Image: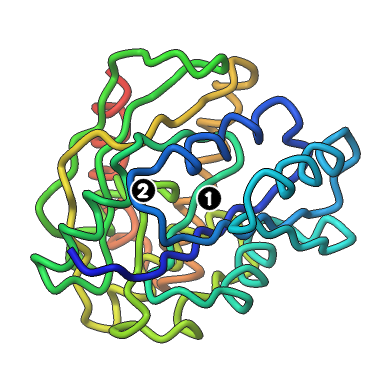
Amino acid sequence: MSEVLVSIITPVYNAEKFIANTVDSVLAQTVDKWELILAENGSKDGTKKILEELRQKDPRIKVMYLGDNVGAAKARNAGIKKASGRYIAFLDADDLWNENKLKDQIRFMEKKNAAFSFTGYEFGTEAAEPTGKIVHVPESLTYRQALKNTTIFTSTVMFDTRKIAKEELFMPAIKSEDTALWWQILRSGKKAYGLNKNLVLYRRPAKSLSSNKLEAVRRIWYLYRKWEKLNVFQSAWYFIHWGARAVKRRI
């Protein structure tokens, strides 16, 4: 495996309960060549104090203060602009990585000659306790396949900027901006490769799960109709498949 720099982009907003654990999971990585860009997004809690303490732990940890709460998409985009690594990976402020996440994914991308990859992951409780619900991912996804199968989870994604320009990774300022970006990249003809290995813990807050599900339904329908500009029948077709897979992932 070649020694290449990975830029890890993490938008941070009111994350005082989680961010230290998330950063610790990066510090525990079995590869050393990374930079962690924490894009602080106008937090109102004690997040900023914690970020300053974290920054003192390792020079690879960099903090950007964006001022107002500009949203996760613009925060990630600011981090991408600052990134200097060949590879760009996303990590949300409350998720955790397996210590071999970067090593295994870089090796996988080199083997596949991949521009875009994602991995398996496991649902965790708010206290970051594994639930045993592991999401297995397909070997690859094309654009049409991805419209029916939104198993690409943000904290598992990695891009090779030698194959996809940084400017192509900017997320649109809409809801479900991450899924919109995956589709945009795949629509251009590229393929996403899945490493079917559980390398990420997806922390899920206990509160408002039912309302979150309803919001997810609204967002995905909006993406089909407004972002992808599919007609009602096409949207319904993909939506049915998306819903079935989404339910299956959580059983």
> Up-down: is 104 above or below 50?
below
Q: Nearer the viewer, residue 104 or 12?
A: 104
Q: Is residue 42 left or right of residue 198?
A: right
Please give the residue where the numbered disc 2 appears in the rendered image: 156
Q: Which mark is residue 219?
A: 1
Q: Is residue 173 left or right of residue 88?
A: right
> Up-down: is 68 above or below 83?
above
Q: Tell me the quarter of the picture where residue 76 sits.
A: bottom right
The amino acid type found where label 1 is placed reads Arg
Sort mark 1 into few (<14), some (14-19) or many (20+) by Cα contacts within 10 Å. some
Residue located 51% across and 69% down the image: 226
Residue 133 percent location from the top left of the image: 29, 19
Q: Tell me the quarter of the picture where residue 205 sits.
A: top right
Q: Tell me which label, 2 or 1, sits earlier in the chain.
A: 2
Q: Nearer the viewer, residue 44 or 22?
A: 22
Q: Nearer the viewer, residue 69 or 66?
A: 66
Please, what secondary structure does the residue beneath circle 2 have?
helix
